[in-house]
Amino acid sequence: MNVTLHAAPILRTVLREQVRIVARSLIREARAFAAVLAIVAVVIGVEIFYGRAALWFDSDDWAAIGLVALVFPFSVWRRDRLFMPAFLWTLPVNRAQLLYAKVFAGWVWLMVAFIVFVAFQFALSLLSGLASPQIISFDAGIGITALYLLGSGILLGLRHPLRWFLGAAGVLIMLGLLERGLASGPWAFEIFFETPQLKSAVERFTSAWQRLPRFAQSLIPNLLMLVVGFLTVRTAASRHADNRRR
Amino acid sequence: MSHQEERDITGVPAVATFALSLRYGKQLALNNVDLRIPEGAIYVLAGTNGAGKSSVMKSLLNLERPHAGCAEVFGLDTVARGPEVRAQIGYIPESHAHDYGWLNCGQLLQHVSSFYPAWDHAYAETLNKAFDITLGRRVDTLSKGEARRLQFVLALAHRPPLLLLDEPTDGLDPLARSRTLAILAEHLADAPTTVMMSTHHIGEIESLADHLGVLQTGKLVAQLSRDELRTTVHRFVLDVPEDWNAPTELRSLDLRRSRTGRELQGTFIGKQADVRARLSSSGATVRDVSAVTLEHAALALLNDGESRP
Amino acid sequence: MQHRHGTLVLVNLSPADARPLYLQIMDEVRRAIVVGSLRAEDPLPSVRELAAELVVNPRTVSQAYNELEREGVLYVRRGQGTFVSPDVTRGAEQRRRSQARDVARRALLEARRNGLDVDEFVTMLRELAAEEQNGGTEAGRPNETGDDE
């Protein structure tokens, strides 16, 4: 008998299917998002009706949005067991590619949500007539993407991402407490920063930074974060790669 | 990428492992396993729980990474060419639960189908009917039997050249078992397929299987084809003197003696004429010789492996 | 199974039978021809159907059909399936004899296994046959030796 070997799927098919299945798995999140927007719309509507100022969102809130982007991967990958003989890894697809495809699919929907959010905010600003429409900077999208990638990398690369998250938070809090408790006395890092060479290097860097144009000042850190995000995802993907030997 | 790849794989075994070893922590799950499954074989892997049957299948899918040795599927290395290898495989895992239990059956079938260019939608529909799948049911609300049947559709619908079935009839009621095996037999008649299956119910695939491998705590203690089994493993009934002992040069399995000590039954390994001659010269009278069933052979070999160091 | 248009041949396989399965299938087809349940030009079930029905390896069924084709018992019509040869009646007498020999050989084996002398066994056979013909009541009695034909 003649056996014809079967082919693996092409990348485009895998991408399309991941975008589709991630959408299906995020239906609950999408509903919650819509509900939040609806509530906000009602509240703002009432405020506008009574003629009160209705600027409900200002630039400080981007921190909250960033946090959402950071934990969003937990929603995208909720259904997959990553470090066990998982269904995902039985599929005839290069595992690193499959992982990238799914990260990409999650990003697509994150961006859709972002655009909806921006449009919503824009519409409300126009309606309230009080605030001038904020121009949403291009690099907000980059920042969100970077945080999303960072979150994905942490989630996919670590066997116990939640423990790492909590652990890191714990360490930070401990450090804060320590600093408060022992406020006096020079600390190791203070001594480190007092080194003259370092001090002058820092000063030179700051002055160079301030001479940069404004857009660059916000773009560069975002791009740097994006690179870090990519690298974490890449590192995570290598943990799941097909040819990774024990 | 072409839809289907033409490669000359004449004479290449469907599955070959080379001194494959697998460790879970300190425990050795597979120990120097040299499996050979010829193309087109229906190979049954027997062994007690934890003998390593599932581990073999998982390492073929590269779900478990070998600690030493390697494995090939149709000549493709399972680690270096994992995606291609997995494209050849239909897999029914031991577990009935599915990671994507939140989908309904139809959605899951659709999702999985997109990963197999060879997926035959018409055949999938036929299988859905044959296995009585309700497409609208959520996968995680299915009973064990229903989940198993769905897994059969998922594994068969792309007509994979290699099927890995880990306890495939587990969870099925007796009627569903026989139906499922009949569908499997039909499937095998339609497409050239190699099957590797593990089961605790060897009796029910007695006439389906043509190769037997016996795993004992991670070691492959026996591997033989049906024909080899027929010519080299026999069950003997003997009349023996009371102080008779089996000739040491004969490999015998599960010998049982009547209470009087004058009748003895047992399985002997070797060419029948040869065994007969040796038994006669040792003073035993051969009263009956019969072929053994696959199930009997598996049990005898397992018992034997257990009693030897 | 979802499509079953009546069983075409009643094939019974015995797991206790020492002979290879394809030989058993061949014997069953021959038996069906001898007893007349299969006649010249009758269609046989496809390999697929018979494999599914018996839950045997389709290769085993193919092997049996191929052997029977070689012996001239069956023939293949392209695209239509396998049929009983038109001249199957020609060798019928010879086949009947060889089948009788087969049955006798198995019976003899069973007799020896039970420590019976050949003459004693043959005499007993005749006695039994005579009893069944005369009385008829004995015919329905369960068989003591077990599951032979």
Image: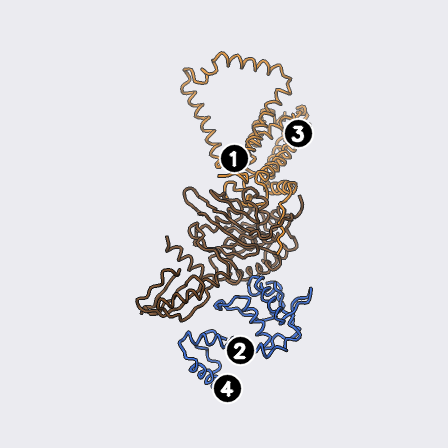
Name the residue carrying label 4.
Answer: C133
Q: Which chain is orange?
A: A
- Depth check: C101 or A229 in front? C101
Q: Chain of mark 2?
A: C
Element type at marker 2? helix
- Residue B214: give x, y in percent of width and height: 45, 55
Q: Chain of mark 1?
A: A
Please give the label number shown on residue A157: 1
Looking at marks 1 and 3 on the same chain, the residue that comes earlier in the sequence is marked by 3
Density class for disc 3 (Cα within 10 Å; few <14, some 14-19, many ≥20) is many
What's the amino acid at mark 4?
Gln
Work out how far the residue at label 4 is from the one at label 2, CA to CA, in angstroms. 20 Å
Disc 4 with disc 1 on a shared chain: no
Element type at marker 4? helix
Work out how far the residue at label 1 is from the one at label 3, CA to CA, in angstroms. 40 Å
Q: Chain of mark 3?
A: A
Name the residue carrying label 2.
Answer: C100
Disc 1 with disc 3 on a shared chain: yes
Left or right relative to B59: residue B122: right
Please give the label number shown on residue A228: none
Hue used for the chain lettered C: blue
At x 55% / y 78%, what residue is drawn?
Answer: C97
- Residue A63: give x, y in percent of width and height: 56, 27
Left or right relative to C95: residue A127: right
